[in-house]
Amino acid sequence: MQTTLIYPGTFDPITKGHSDLVERSLRLFDKIIVAVAADTKKTTVFSCAERVELAQTVLAEFANVEVCAFSGLLVQFARQKGASAILRGLRAMSDFEYEFQLAGINRVFDKDIETLFLTPSAQYTYVSSSMIREAAELGGDISSFVEPAVEAALQKKLHGIS
């Protein structure tokens, strides 16, 4: 029986921290579905289609990873995809309370879908998409936090540099 994990997020943009969690999750699950949230209250730099495309580019080396957009309740999407678990990344204690509440409400919606928490590798513990966007906007070197395609896309989007 194939095990499937959903890894949801806005991925605006996808970072090396996200890729790290995907790669490590492949040791535990047969298939990872990176679910890019179309419905988000966050203001995003990239459209949903652009976020999906960037994630597909970054994660292309992993044969058992699918990237797609989703909208609506995450647990409904997970059920449709036949996933047995949802992955949430925890960088710091500040992430825990929100993620813990989210896991609890998802369990109410579907008790058969588990939520797993993974911490990123040490070099990505402090990396967040919002920090990457801000650093890029201010002209910082983000090359150690994102893949070249993501850096180029951010430079083009934020500064009109091709």
Image: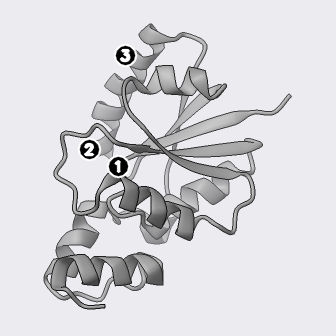
Kind of residue indicated by mark 1:
Thr
Looking at the image, residue 110 sits to the left or right of residue 138; the answer is right
Which residue lies under the disc numbered 3? 105
Which residue lies under the disc numbered 2? 94
Write the residue at 35% across / 66% down: 127
Looking at the image, residue 70 sits to the left or right of residue 112; the answer is left
Circles 3, 2 touching at the beta carbon (< 8 Å): no
Write the residue at 65% across / 25% down: 84
Q: CA distance from mark 3 to mark 2?
A: 18 Å
Image coords of residue 106 (percent x, y): 43, 18
Circles 3, 1 touching at the beta carbon (< 8 Å): no
Looking at the image, residue 101 sits to the left or right of residue 89; the answer is left
Q: CA distance from mark 1 to mark 2?
A: 18 Å
Residue 114 makes an appearance in the image: no
Kind of residue indicated by mark 3:
Ile
Which residue lies under the disc numbered 1? 10
